[in-house]
Image (tube, rainbow, N blue to C red):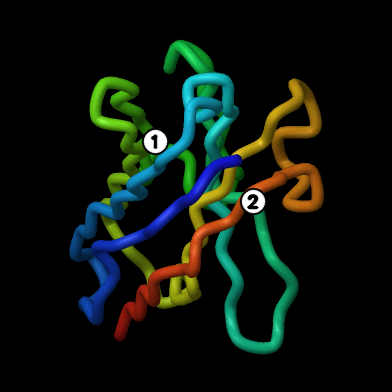
Amino acid sequence: QVQLVESGGGLVQAGDSLRLSCAASGRTFSRCYMGWVRQAPGKERDFVATIAWGGGSTYYADSVKGRFTISRDNAKNTVYLQMNSLKPEDTAVYYCACKMISGYYSDPRRYNYWGQGTQVTVSS
């Protein structure tokens, strides 16, 4: 069982940066493919980024490539999402999630554990 708690969201202007953190607990954390998924008002959940157990394999949605960076520190049981050059369309609730199986990294339905979410609002 994995417990996830996100933090670091806030209200910023377009072009600003934010760093989200996800604190995890549970022995299975190191086995997780950790992902970030976001949900804008009135829309379905969209994949943002994911990272493998060892941190060597990362994947990003086309909409955030070159702007967002996902990383993890297993010693601290923490995963991060560095968000640069933020745009108004990035406004959403950002969720940290854990996927126990390989593959289907861009499908939010494949993630088994979820945090409570943290709000990111980007004004123009």
Secondary element under disc 1, as helix, strand or loop, is: strand
Identify the residue under disc 1.
70
| 93 w.r.t. 41: above or below | above
Q: Residue 98: percent from the left, percent from the top?
A: 59, 40
Q: Which residue is located at x 39 percent, y 38 percent?
A: 66
Q: Is residue 95 visible?
A: yes
Res 3 label: none
Nearest the viewer among 107 and 29 is 29
Secondary element under disc 2, as helix, strand or loop, is: strand
Mark closest to the chain's N terminus, 1 or 2 = 2
Q: Residue 111: percent from the left, percent from the top?
A: 71, 45
Q: Residue 46: percent from the left, percent from the top?
A: 67, 59
Res 47 label: 2
Describe residue 33's horizontal placement relative to residue 92 as left or right. right
Marks 1 and 2, how far apart at CA: 13 Å
The amino acid type of the residue labelled 2 equals: Phe
Q: Residues within 10 Å of mark 2 (few under 14, many from 20)?
A: many
The amino acid type of the residue labelled 1 equals: Ile
Describe residue 8's horizontal placement relative to residue 23 as left or right. left
Q: Which residue is located at x 49 percent, y 26 percent?
A: 27
Nearest the viewer among 44 and 27 is 27
Q: Is residue 124 visible?
A: no
Q: Which residue is located at x 80 percent, y 51 percent?
A: 109
Q: Residues within 10 Å of mark 1 (few under 14, many from 20)?
A: many
| 16 w.r.t. 92: above or below | above
Q: Which residue is located at x 36 percent, y 49 percent?
A: 22
Quadrant that contains the N terminus: top right
